[in-house]
Amino acid sequence: MCGIFGYVGKRDNGLELVVKGLQKLEYRGYDSWGVATELSGELFIKKQVGKISEAKLEDFADKKTGLAIGHTRWATHGGVTDINAHPHFSSDKKVAVVHNGIIENYEEIREELGRGNFISDTDTEVIPQLISKYLKEMSFKEAVQKTVQRLSGRYAIVAIAVGENLLIAARRGSPLIVGVGEEEYFLASDIPAFLEYTQNVNYLDDNEMVILDGNVEFLNIDTGTAIKKRLVNIDWKAESADKGEYDHYMLKEIMEQKDSILRAINQNTDDIMHIAQMIKDSRGCFLSGCGTAGKVCMAAEYFFSIIAGRHVNYAPASEFPIFHHFLKPESLLIVVSQSGETADVLEAMEAAKGKGAKVLSIVNVESSTIARQSDFSLHIKAGPEKAVASTKAATAQMALFLLITTAMKGELQEGRRILAEVASRTNDMLNPRFLNYIKEVTQKIKGHDNLYIIGKAENYPMALEAAIKIQEVSYVHAEGFAAGELKHGPIALITEGTPCISMIANDEVKSDVINNTIELKARGAHIIGISPDKHEVFDEWIKVPDVGVASPLVNIIPVQLLAYYLGVLRGLDPDMPRNLAKSVTVK
Ligand code: AGP
């Protein structure tokens, strides 16, 4: 939620650089944007409602500066207005701040500083006002430190002050990474924002501050003690985080799944065996995640049951802390997250750790907060995922659960064989003819406002996931059901022509799902069958490979495409759905 970017260094086009960096962070928030620097001894701020991708670099070409900050917003406190856009500044126009997160005690600080001094409706504005107040009595560094010591909530901030040629940043709970170049430093919410300039990073941890001028200095917010940091080299290629030949990141990421699934096979055997043993040794194993990652957890529940014969409980991360009564020091919580920064997941982890339980995480962003706060973390290696709709991360996460559960059964090699087949058959499936056919099917249903999806066993979570994909990129009302649940209520929604997707595998529940599909058809539904085999009940048949228990991995891909085309055909931008952001760092 919200992207922040800062630059200090040898170049004099700092503002342009910040705008370019923010454009790479647009997926984190796109309702308004802004930048700030010091020009001729005064604060220069430009901020406005709109997408950062629409900002013109030439507007900043004549403003020479080697230090600047910027922000692309996903509104939490205060509506989408120019005034509520970041950077926020102090009344004396000496301090400007960009912020990602929520300051929970902002009302109390506003009261203390005098409500009349505030011009925005945001929680953020208290930060520059406090810094400026303290700056009258102490150094900039001390003023920022004293300010952040007073804040409660989750935040990542970057501050500048007139007359101080440095950036000061602090974090608690929201991501912030320092990019270390030659005679220059970058600060960003996510690594791809500065990847074209440097691959060397320092991770800022919770309760830490960093002061960047010609040098870098890390310190603990509470004690002021200096902290030594390890320089980490990131092996992502800058181009892997770009759209390349595709119109949208979402389509690019869907197409990359043949490779991302294959990469799961190359996971280190020792890591997979270690995880399998951790699960076997645990007494009470739980799964948690949000949205798509949560649906992956649900699919994993079936893998644990069907493949490893083990009962594992799932709860959405926002609900998980309620189950803390069941947690013991011998319990294990497995969390799944693409970004590794989701606030609800972090809370679930805190609940588990509070009871002495261990936490294992499966994340796509190595060294993310969730990874670093886990007892053991597995990196899914799907590569950067930029579209708000999660696609390749989800299938890669499911691939890992398949490996883990086959390893628990003592059949890791068989797990690898299955995944190699899934990857190769996904490669075959994602051909231009297949894509065109999905587009044709989408054309036929694009005018409908309601769409239902059914699945059973390991494809039931995929029916739920299919609904999320369609909802978020096309705004069509889509709902997923366990196929057998239809007759207990949802079937009343079906009228003549209602599009219904039936997700089928060649498994022992196939005939049940076919029967439920026939029940839908009898009420007039237009049936889109996703299945390895054709059936007369289908009005449209989307053929998927027969990959046995791994069917969720291939069955979800046509729905990802259908959701994508539905969004495009309805004139929407699938990469930037309204009201959503890629990384949800607020509760
Ligand atoms: C996925 O399409 C969604 N945008 C969303 O549900 C997402 O999966 C969820 O917010 C969890 O994110 P995470 O994987 O980064 O934790």
Image (cartoon, grey):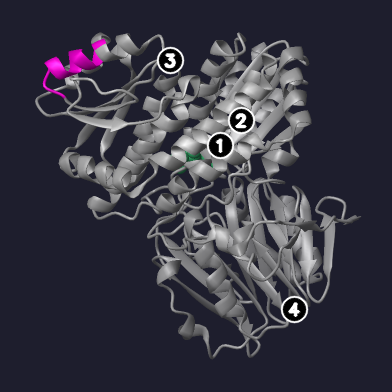
What residue type is disc 2 on? Leu
- The nearer-to-camera label among 3 and 4 is 3
Is residue 517 within the magenta segment?
A: yes
What residue type is disc 3 on? Ala
Q: Secondary structure at mark 1?
A: helix
Residue 409 position in % (x across, y down)? 67, 13
Cβ of mark 1 under 8 Å from ligand 1: the answer is no
Q: Classify mark 1: residues with Cα within 10 Å, few (<14), some (14-19) or many (20+).
A: many
Q: Earlier in the sequence, mark 3 or mark 1?
A: 1
Bounds of the magenta span? 515-525
Q: Secondary structure at mark 2?
A: helix
Q: Residue at image x 60%, y 45%? A: 104
Q: Earlier in the sequence, mark 2 or mark 3?
A: 2
State the separation of the CA atoms marked 2 and 3: 19 Å
Q: Residue at image x 72%, y 62%? A: 178
Q: Earlier in the sequence, mark 3 or mark 4?
A: 4
Residue 30 position in % (x across, y down)? 43, 59
- The nearer-to-camera label among 4 and 2 is 2
* Residue 457: assigned label: 3
Circles 3, 4 touching at the beta carbon (< 8 Å)? no
Residue 406 falls in which quadrant of the image? top right
Q: Earlier in the sequence, mark 4 or mark 1?
A: 4
Of the 4 image quadrants, the one containing the C terminus is: top right
> Disc 4 designates what residue?
164
Q: Residue at image x 34%, y 32%? A: 467
Q: Earlier in the sequence, mark 4 or mark 2?
A: 4
> Disc 1 designates what residue?
396
Residue 453 position in % (x across, y down)? 30, 26
Q: With respect to residue 90, does 29 lie above or below?
A: above
* Residue 400: assigned label: 2
